[in-house]
Amino acid sequence: MKSPTPYDAIILGAGGAGLMCAGIAAQRGKRVLVIDHAPEPGKKILISGGGRCNFTNLGAAPDRYLSANPHFAKSALARYTGQDFLELVVRHRIAWHEKTLGQLFCDGSARQIVRLLLDEADGAEIALGSPIRDVSYADGQFGVTFGDRTASAPALVIATGGPAIPKLGATGFAYDLARKFGLKVVEPRPALVPLTLGADEALFRELSGVATPVVARCGKVAFAEAALFTHRGLSGPAILQISSYWKHGASVGIDFLPGADPGWALAAKRTRPRATLRSLIGGHLPDRLAEALGARIALPGDLASLTDRALGAVEARLSDWRFTPNGSEGFAKAEVTAGGISTAGLSSQTMSARHLPGLYAIGEAVDVTGWLGGYNFQWAWASGVAAGRSL
């Protein structure tokens, strides 16, 4: 085999973080090689946001990220903000709009974001469709064998993401490589993922396709967005958000009437004494959902026939209806991976390994996971920039 081709940095992974890192480093005059086993770059970007890419969130503060070290993301996010990426989008003349809650999308196609990243990384060499056969380290140099080639560099960036959405080629390769070079890994798990319900809650699975605004709670965390019933359990933005905090055995509380004033059922008893509980609930919720909740509560007769105590219990239950999921739909349906390469071994300033100069980890491969709504892309950009400036 030929002698290794020398580079200043080798980046493993042509996703958002890897391409961002490559662009920053190449613009600083570094000779950069990006390697990816996929035949095209940015595959997760292309499917995000319904094909329009929710490319950042203007509210991307550190408290909206999960990590074993909640302070780790502060430095990178502060030095490269959602506004910074938006300015890049504008500079590339990509039309955009704000949807809700600070979420920014392309007016056109997610391919515009991939093109932006490739244009920014114009000075880097990108090798696609190139499975990595071996990665080694000796005498201050990393060696990477891919296809029939070998490359070497004093810097190696792990940007291959996590195992979420395996149909796109996602794997746990980043974790294997991290462990090989002495970095610890926080147990990876699916995040931003639908939750499944057991047989005892099969009634709700029959509501597949029904959605309604709710407040979903797990522990001390709550999200006010829509919930969607599926043939396997619960989904929708509120559930995807809460899933990142949910652990096996824990329950999820759903407030089905988040805008209702305290005492609403008792007030209705005075103004509409002949109304049934079913009709009362039906005025606020989709018919099929109101029917199912009414059947579970099972209080017959009109409101006048019900005691104040019974109606108070109805209010309490509808404001905190408890589900105990038996699992999730796993990495196949998860939007991202929680956990990953431990931040304990990384510099929050540069994303480099503390014990091995020249080794970096960025993006979803790292134990930093954002909320739904552009937060994870912002982490990809920010962590990629942090590493790219350090290479």
Image (cartoon, rainbow, N blue to C red):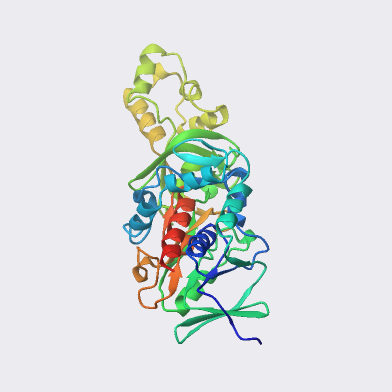
Looking at the image, which residue is at 35% across and 63% down? 348
| Nearer to me, 288 or 152 | 152
- Residue 268, by quadrant, is top left
| Nearer to me, 127 or 259 | 127
Residue 237 in sight:
yes
- Residue 76, by quadrant, is bottom left
Position of residue 218 in the picture relative to residue 36 (left or right): left
| Nearer to me, 337 or 54 | 54
- Residue 266, by quadrant, is top left
| Nearer to me, 329 or 155 | 155
x%, y% of residue 240? 49, 47
Residue 373 in sight:
no
Looking at the image, which residue is at 60% across and 43% down? 52
Position of residue 72 in the picture relative to residue 363 (left or right): left
x%, y% of residue 274? 45, 13
**In which quadrant of the rendered image does the N terminus lie?**
bottom right
Looking at the image, which residue is at 40% across and 70% down? 352
